[in-house]
Amino acid sequence: MNASEALLEAAARVIPGGVNTCRRRSEPRLCFRRGSGAYLEDLDGRSFIDYHAAYGAILLGHSHPAVTARVASAIEQTVLFGVGVTESEVALAEKIVEHVPSVEQVVVCNSGSEATYHAIRLARGVTGREKLIKFQGCYDGFHDYVLRNVLSRPEGVGARDPHSAGMLEAAVDATLVCRYNDLEDVRATLERHGEEVAAIIVEPVAHNSPGLLPRPGFLEGLRELCDATGALLIFDEVITGFRHHIGGYQAVCGVLPDLTTMGKAIANGFPLAAIGGRREYLERLNTTADGDVHFGGTYNGNAAAVEAGLATIAQLEDGTVHEHIFALGERMRSGLAEVADRVGVPAVVGGFGSLFVLCFMDGPLETYEDVLRNDDALFGRYRRELVARGVFEMPESLGRSHIGASHTTEDIDRSLEAAEDALRAAVDALARA
Ligand SMILES: Cc1ncc(COP(=O)(O)O)c(C=O)c1O
């Protein structure tokens, strides 16, 4: 048994399953003791180029010195006061308002799930309506409002598919599910329920599916349908926020939502999330004297998260990080397509900007039904072969991979060599099985 397996076994005595988030259980079983830049070191001292990036929370690189130094210095005098506001909280809000086109005001919390929860309740408060539209294959957090029809099996698509025991039935039924990239489906749903729908929540790029880009006109169409029916448009930019642009994907696509949720990359691994949007909506929060929509959270605006957010923004403002990671993303996606071609495996490379995912199927990759054609067995085996070659992409079905500022061209080229080797090994292994 290696050191990771031993730790996970010890952990399982006191932590159910040995991990603190369901998707941290992986095969091979790995635990890491150090992250530095683009690299991770496991408990046995083996080094990996990391593309998991803690599900995308790491954008600048692990333990980025500008971020950790700023956090370390700030927390000597400030951790959390729980009253009023700090200068840094104001500075952070000013920066988000400056950069994210639709955001006039913003509040912060600690996780993406909190952010989507608050945004949805705010939309319900503003509209006085209860129903919500989400999309099949999108993940918008762990709470009952949105935890249905996530990565559904084929039989769950088009059906009522709650993702957990213990969910409130009424919450599941208040959430209507449409097909991502299918405007007609949204239009038909709104024709049936238009008066009842408080909001449409959408990952502007459906990275949880993974890698579905919005078809031209899809996001614009959602904007028009919301305007026509009085529903609010919520962009769930928990993955795309800061990762695709310091202004979020909305700054790339030019479609402005009413509310935006952000998390993950905005503080390079520290627990910061945000809900932003039009002033008239945000001022309904009971952080104002007259607000009637509850907004609370003991840890909101804690110094570690806020300083990490400010340090991350400072690294992103001149645009060079995005230039770098987009160029590496292109190199990786086109390189992977060539690898699959050389090995002779039908494949589509999904993703955008710094994100990529190699799916084993014929194209197109535009809808959730397309995603279901992926060869799961090959995908899982390929990822495990990659890990064995020192490239860490999450060895789970359909996990997206992330490039960050600390990856280099050499890292990408070395990873592509490993990818070719891994894919040949995976194909051979499955042919022998
Ligand atoms: C698009 C999206 N929204 C919301 C969430 C929830 O964020 P958190 O895990 O920080 O609660 C996630 C997490 O993966 C996500 O990908």
Image: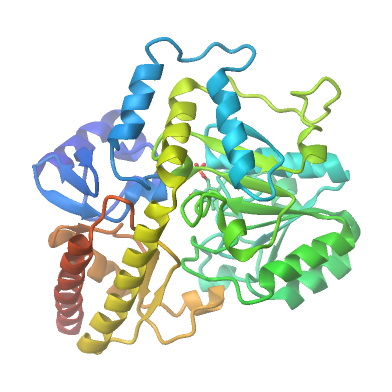
Q: Nearer the viewer, residue 121 or 20?
A: 121
Residue 348 rendering spot, x and y as whole percentages: 39, 80
Residue 170 rendering spot, x and y as whole percentages: 75, 47
The residue depicted at 23 percent of the width and 65 percent of the height is 412
Q: Nearer the viewer, residue 392 or 308?
A: 308
- Tell me the quarter of the image containing the C terminus: bottom left
Q: Nearer the viewer, residue 296 or 325?
A: 325
Q: Is residue 201 left or right of residue 288?
A: left
Q: Examine the rendered structure and indicate whether residue 161 appears above or below residue 41.
A: below
Q: Examine the rendered structure and indicate whether residue 266 appears above or below residue 307.
A: below
Can you name the residue that lies furthest to the right here? 195
The residue depicted at 28 percent of the width and 41 percent of the height is 62
- Tell me the quarter of the image containing the N terminus: top left
* Visible residue check, residue 227: yes
Q: Is residue 32 left or right of residue 237?
A: left
Residue 22 rendering spot, x and y as whole percentages: 40, 45
The residue depicted at 39 percent of the width and 60 percent of the height is 323
- Place residue 334 in its image quadrant: bottom left
